[in-house]
Image (spheres, coloured by chain):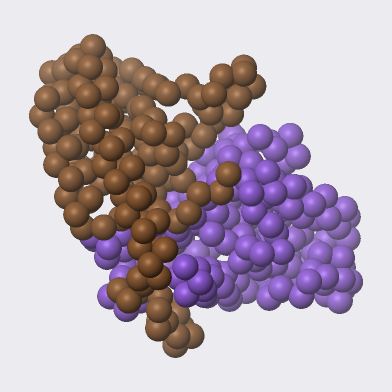
Amino acid sequence: MLGSDLVMYDEEFKLIDAELQRLLQQANAKVVFLVDKNGQLIAATGETENLDTTSLASLTAGNIAATGGMAKLLGEKEFSILFHEGARDNIHISIIGQRVILVVIFDQRSSLGLVRLRVKKSAEALGSIFSQLLQKVETEKGSGKSADSPFAEITDEDIDKLFG
Amino acid sequence: MSFINYSSREINCKIVFYGPGLCGKTTNLQWIYKKTNPDSKGKMISLATETERTLFFDFLPLALGEIRGFKTRFHLYTVPGQVFYDASRKLILKGVDGVVFVADSQVERMEANIESIENLRINLAEQGYNLDKVPFIIQYNKRDLPNVVPLEEMKKALNPRGVPDYEAVATDGTGVFDTLKAIAKLVIMELKKGQDGG
């Protein structure tokens, strides 16, 4: 099924950001971020200064997509958790509500067990924020409320300007 | 599937370069990467084999500037062109906002072009898209080679619908930015249409 475009509002963004920060602390993680299944970074928190989060987001989505392809071949619906273990850092990836991907990067200050436990709790919270968001998007669409839309009065000239 | 973030005032769109093996999809992205201001591009990622054939995808994030106060970002992807990587190609089309078909102009690659464009139509349909409806641009690449098919013939075989098309030599950049600009324009116009209609 073809989903609608992903839209994010300030209110939900703040809720998501707060939840990611809570997870970061409780799981003793280095970085926590959230990615759309198509590879768009939604939010990130933690030690992200020297991290190429855009590329990480795209590769995470590719990783989930490839794993999902493998699941299908085995007759599974999806593999909802992926775990990559490194010498220093580890990555825990999980799918939330079949739509978004939660990524936790952690080192020896934490453990896989703790991360799994905390991720499970946060997944519920994030899942309900996203349901709320989707509902909001649907309602706004239904009411035809697009006054704030950046596209409403866009012209050819605006687009030409993008390319300087 | 675009991502509109009202919180950070950003619009993200996904564009996929499709086409038969060795037609120049990666070369298109490499040229764009080379010629873009360092401030407006991210790292280019290539998941390729040791012989530099694309294994999964190339990825290049581009920030193009602002539209009405919204930062506009395009995420450019290529697919692996070789026939047996079909499963990977399908995955990369997920959530696509616009497609560029890069055709190889050499006579001996015409069959591969036709096969690839048919494959594109099928794989898009599997994701719920109709090739006749998504923003779509065709690029006839390698026009500098001696054994190319005449333009009119290529148009007839690959572009019966008459979508915007461009001649290109991706290795020296000819036509590369024209193609990018054209697809960006179509994608943004489609977003506008979606908003008006919604």
In this rendering, position of residue B120 left or right of residue A72:
right
Residue at the limit of the structure toward the top, as seen here: A113
Q: What residue is rendered at 51% in x and 34% in y?
A: A65
Q: In this view, does A103 lie above or below B168?
A: above
From the rendered image, report the letter of the chain displayed in purple: B
The residue lying toward the viewer, choosing from A78 and A65, is: A78
Measured from the top left, where is residue A149 in percent x and y?
35, 72
Residue A26 appears in the figure = yes
Measured from the top left, where is residue B140 in percent x and y?
73, 67
Residue B177 appears in the figure = no
The quadrant where residue B109 appears:
bottom right
The quadrant where residue B61 appears:
bottom left
The residue lying toward the viewer, choosing from A68 and B173, is: A68
Measured from the top left, where is residue B188 in percent x and y?
48, 71
Measured from the top left, where is residue A110 in percent x and y?
16, 17
Total count of labels = 0
Q: What residue is rendered at 31% in x and 19% in y?
A: A86
Q: What residue is rendered at 26% in x and 22% in y?
A: A120
Colour of the chain lettered A: brown
Q: Which quarter of the rendered picture does the C terminus of chain A lie within?
A: bottom left
In this rendering, position of residue B142 left or right of residue B189:
right
Q: What residue is rendered at 14% in x and 37% in y?
A: A21
The residue lying toward the viewer, choosing from A107 and B186, is: B186
In this rendering, position of residue B143 left or right of residue A127:
right
Q: Which quarter of the rendered picture does the N terminus of chain A lie within?
A: top right
